[in-house]
Amino acid sequence: MNYHRTLKSAVAALAVAVPLCWSGFANAQDAVNLRMTIWSANEAHLKLFSDIAAGFKKDHPNVTVTYESLPFDTYTTALTTQIAGGNAPDMAWIFETAAYDFVNSGALYPLTDTLKSTKGYNAEELSATAAERWTKDGKLFAYPFSTSPFAMFVNNDLIKASGAKTPAEMIAANQWTWDNAIATASTVGKTGKGGLIVRDFNYQIWQNLASVWNGWGASPWSADGKTCTMTEKPMVDALTFIHDAVFKNKAMPGPGESVDFFAGNAAMTITQISRASLLPKDKPFAWDLVPLPKGPAGNYALIGQAGVGVMQSGKNAKTAAEFVAYMTNPENSAKLSQFFPSARKSLLNAEVLKKTNPLLSQEQIDKVVISGIATGKVIPGHTGFAQIQQVVRSGLDAVWRPDANIPAALQQICGQIGPLLKR
Amino acid sequence: MAVVQQTAHPEGRSSSSFWTVARRDSLAGFLFIAPQLIGITLFVLTPLCLVFWYSLHEWNVLANTFTYTGLANYQMLLEDTSLPSVLGATAIFSAGLVIFNLSLALLLAVLLNQKLAGITIFRTLFFSPVVVSLVAWTIVWGFLLQKNGGINGVLLVFGIDGPNWLREPVTAMISVIVVQVFKNVGLNMILFLAALQGVPNELYEAARIDGAPRFKQFRRITLPLISPTILLTSIITIVGSLQVFAQIAVLTQGGPGLTTTVLVYYLYQQAFQFHFFGYGSTLSIMLFVIVAVLTFTQWQMRKRIVFYES
C-alpha cells in the first residue's frame, strides 16, 4: 500500500515538474541578450536607459538589454575593433561624423519598416533634415536620437568685470556679430582670463570650427562631398578671422593652452546645450546662453547629432530593431530629451523643452534650442571621415602658427583630401 | 647520458623497448617547454601568420568584406606619399632615444656606482619612473609641456618665454623623446650598474699604478668590460623605440603635421581609425622586417664590439 502511495506521489510530482522544467528550458532557449555600445557613462543617463530596457522587458520577458560604455575619445575605434574581432554589439550609438561610413557600408540593419509597423510610433514626425544623414535609398539606417544645437555659453561676471559689453546687451542693440564677440573676448583676454573657447576643438577636432566658419558660409567640401572647397574665399576669410583672434587679438586660447570655461576661467564658450550640466554648482557665476553671433553671411546655426543603429551582423537584429523602436517611441523620446534633444516635431516646443531643460529660460529655449534645431546644419561628415579628419588636422597645423600662410596651407590640404573625397 | 642508460636498463631491454631513456628524456624536455611553446605558437606565430594573410587582403570591417588582393597592399606601401615622412620620424625618434637613453643611463650608472651613504635612495629615485603607469606618466608630462604648463611656468620665473613644446615640429619630437627616456632610463641604468659592479677592481688598481688617467681607464677598461651590457641595452632600446605608441597618442597624436607620426602610430591609424586592416597588416609586416634586420645586424656586430665574443 505504501509502495503504491509513494509511486502515485512520484508520478504526480513528475507531472508537475516535467512541464515546468520544459518551459524553463524553452525560455532559456528563447532568451535574447542584446548589447548596446554607448559613449556615455553618466549615471543619470544609464539609469534612464536601464528604465527603458526594463520597460521593454515587460512586453518581451525573454529579452535582456545591457549597455556598454566605451570611452568617448576612442569610441568609433573601439566599436570597429569589436566588429573586426567578431564581437559586434547588437546596437550602437554612432557619431554624426561617422554616419556616412556606417550607413553606406551596409553595416546597419534598416529600421524604417520596424519603426512604421510599431504601434503609436508616429515615424512621420521625425524631422526630415534631422534624418537626412542617417537615410539611404529612402530607408532610415539609424535613428538620430540626439539633435543638439551649438550655442554660446557666457560668463557675464568676467565680461562685466573687464568693462566689455555682454552678448545680451549686444543682442538687444542688434550688434551680436562675430567682430563684436571677438572684441569682447579680446578685452577679457587682456585681463589674464580666457576669451572665447570653441570647446573640444583643441586644434585637433577641427570640424567643431564649423560653429564659426558657417557664419561666413564656408564649408570644407561641396554639397555633394566630391570637391574640396577649403581654398574658396569664405573658408580663407573665416580661418583668417580665427587666426587673427588667436594670434593678434588674443581672444581665443592658442595651441597648447588649456582654459576651462566651466571652471569660470573664460568669457565665452561654444558648445552643445547639453553641456549646461557642467555649469558649476559650488562657485556659480552669472551665466547666459545665447545663439551663435551673426557672421558676414548672416545668422546661422550648427547642430551635432547622435544616432542609434542596429548592427546587420547581429543574430537578433530584428529584436534589436524592435528595441530601438521602443527606445525612441514618443513616450521614451520625451524622457530622453532631458539629455538628448529630440528631432520629433511634437517635442520641439517650448512647453516640453522647458520641462526637460529646467536650467534654460523660455527665451533661451526659443532662440537657441528650437530655432537651432529647426535651422541648423549638421557638423561636417563624409565617407571615410576618420582619414579625411586626420589629413586635414595635420594640414591645419600649418595654419596654427603666428606666421601662417593660410591660403597656401589650405591649398595643400585640398591637394591631399581631393582624392579621398572622390572615393 | 650513455652511462646512465646502460645502468638503468640492460642493453637487451632498452633496444627492444620504444621508450628508451633518451626518448623519455626528450619527451620530458618537450613537456617542460610545452607551455612556452604553445604560448608562442598561439600568441606569436599564429598572429604573425594571420597578419601576413591579412596583408594580402582588403578587409572592410564595416561592410564585412574580405577580398584577396595579392600584393596590392605592398604596392600601396611603395606609393604611400606619407610613408617617407613616417619612416623619417621613426628613424629620428629611434636614433634620438637610443643615443640619449644609453648615454644618460651610463652616466647615471657611473655616478651612482659609488659607495656613499644614502646612494640607494638616489638609485631608487631614478628607477621609480620605470614602475609608474606609462599612460599616467605621459598624461602628467602632457600637462607640464603645455604652452601655459608647468615647465614654461618655471622658465618664466627666470624671464624665459618657453616654446610651445608639443606644437612646434622640433620641440615636439624632442619632448616625446625626453618623456620616453626619463620613463625608461632607470632600467638601463640598473643594467649598467650591475655590469659596472662586475668589473674587477684590480684592473683599475693596475691602471692607476701604470698612471692611466680616469677617462683612459673608463675607455680602456670599463667600456670593453661592459660591452655585452651595452649590446643588450641597445637591442632592447632600439626594439622598444620602434614600438612607441602611448606617448605619441597622448602627447601629440602624431603632430604637428606628421613630424611625430612614428610607424606604430601610423599603423594604428590605418588599421583602427581608418579601418584599412589589410594595409595596416602590411605596415606591421614592414615593422617586423625592420626590427628583425636591426636585431640581426646588431647581433652580428657583437663580434666586433663586444669584448667577450672576440
Image: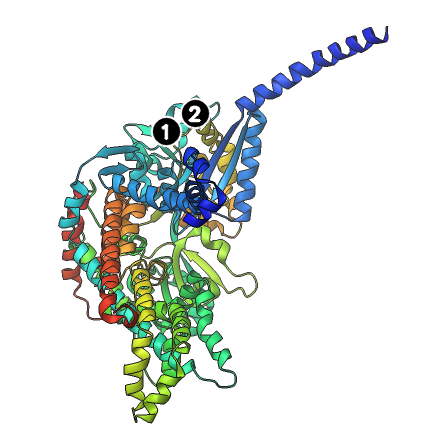
* Residue A405 figure quarter: bottom left
Q: Position of residue A273 (x, y in %)?
A: 43, 51
Is residue A368 found left or right of B63 in the rendered image?
A: right
* Residue type highlighted by circle 1: Tyr
Which of the numbered marks, if any, corresponds to residue B310?
none
Q: Position of residue A402 (x, y in %)?
A: 23, 70
Secondary structure at numbered mark 1: loop
Q: Mark 2 and mark 1 in contact (Cβ < 8 Å)?
A: yes
Check the residue under mark 1 and report the chain it is in.
Answer: A
Is residue A272 found left or right of B217 in the rendered image?
A: right
Give the residue number, with chain letter if any, for mark 2: A318
Q: Position of residue B285 (x, y in %)?
A: 24, 48
Q: Position of residue A315 (x, y in %)?
A: 43, 27
Q: Earlier in the sequence, mark 1 or mark 2?
A: 1
Residue B67 visible to the viewer: yes
Q: Are marks 1 and 2 on the same chain?
A: yes
For mark 2, does the 10 Å Cα neighbourhood hold few (<14), some (14 to 19), or many (20 or more) residues?
Answer: some
Q: Nearer the viewer, residue B80 or B70?
A: B70
Which of the numbered marks, if any, corresponds to residue A109?
1
Whole-number angstrom distance, CA of label 1 to CA of label 2: 8 Å
Q: Residue at x 18, y 55 (%)?
A: B82
